[in-house]
Image: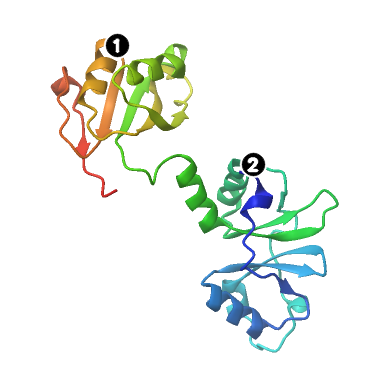
Amino acid sequence: MLAAELIDPMLPALKLTDTVGEAMEWMQEHRIGQMVLTDQNEYKGVLSEDLLMDVADEDIPLTDVMRLFEQVYAFENQHSLELLNLALEHRLEVIAVLNDDREFMGTVSVNELLKNFARELGITEPGAILVLTIDERDYSLTEISRLIESNNVKIIGSYFSSAAYGMPDRSRLTLKLNRRDIGPVVSTLERFGYNVESAFANTPIESIDQERLDLLLRYLNT
């Protein structure tokens, strides 16, 4: 999903002529600790509730208040993953979205961005989660998908995490599946040499090598 599609129309932007008190009221109303500051269609940065609380006079206009992240924003055609990286890097609660002419288009709530990311990964869907420890040289999602689908189970989300430098065999592949009963899937993957590090499901998993692998079974409230 692109940044333009994630803009929250209910989340207003502050103006330079607004006062500190007005800004605090807006933040409390929307239950958010940051808001974007604009001057007409020009992005001016982000205001923080913590900084506003240190201002002695609530009638001071925002033009006289210190602002943050004046050079941190997203363009309308950037992908949601790029926005997520931006938010994590700068610890943002909101992200300003600009068009190609650098005109302010609207604000993305990072909280809603995370919810959208969870939906896209299938995290909110019922089903089991598998974590495989894998050597990067052997990583083939096509092959792993084929083995899983041979048990009439589908992958609805995946995430590959590279290992630390010098440890290529400790990379992790996290899979979200559309079924909770994944015992046959675990058996198939183990039979073909895949190391199932952990499994999270709603039904017991009988592993052909459970003691060696020390599978961790948990229950998800989905």
Q: Residues within 10 Å of mark 2 (few under 14, many from 20)?
A: some
Q: Nearer the viewer, residue 147 or 64?
A: 147
Quadrant in which the N terminus is drawn:
top right
Q: Which residue is mark 1?
A: 193
Q: Which residue is mark 2?
A: 79
Q: Amino acid at mark 1?
A: Gly
- Say left or right for 3 vs 164: right
Q: Residue at x 63, y 87 (%)?
A: 56
Q: Residue at x 57, y 60 (%)?
A: 93
Q: Nearer the viewer, residue 171 or 189?
A: 189
Is residue 165 visible in the rendered image? The answer is yes
Which of pointers 2 and 1 indicates the residue nearer the eye? 2
Q: Earlier in the sequence, mark 2 or mark 1?
A: 2
Q: Position of residue 206 (x, y in %)?
A: 14, 25
Q: Secondary structure beneath disc 1?
A: loop
Q: Amino acid at mark 2?
A: His
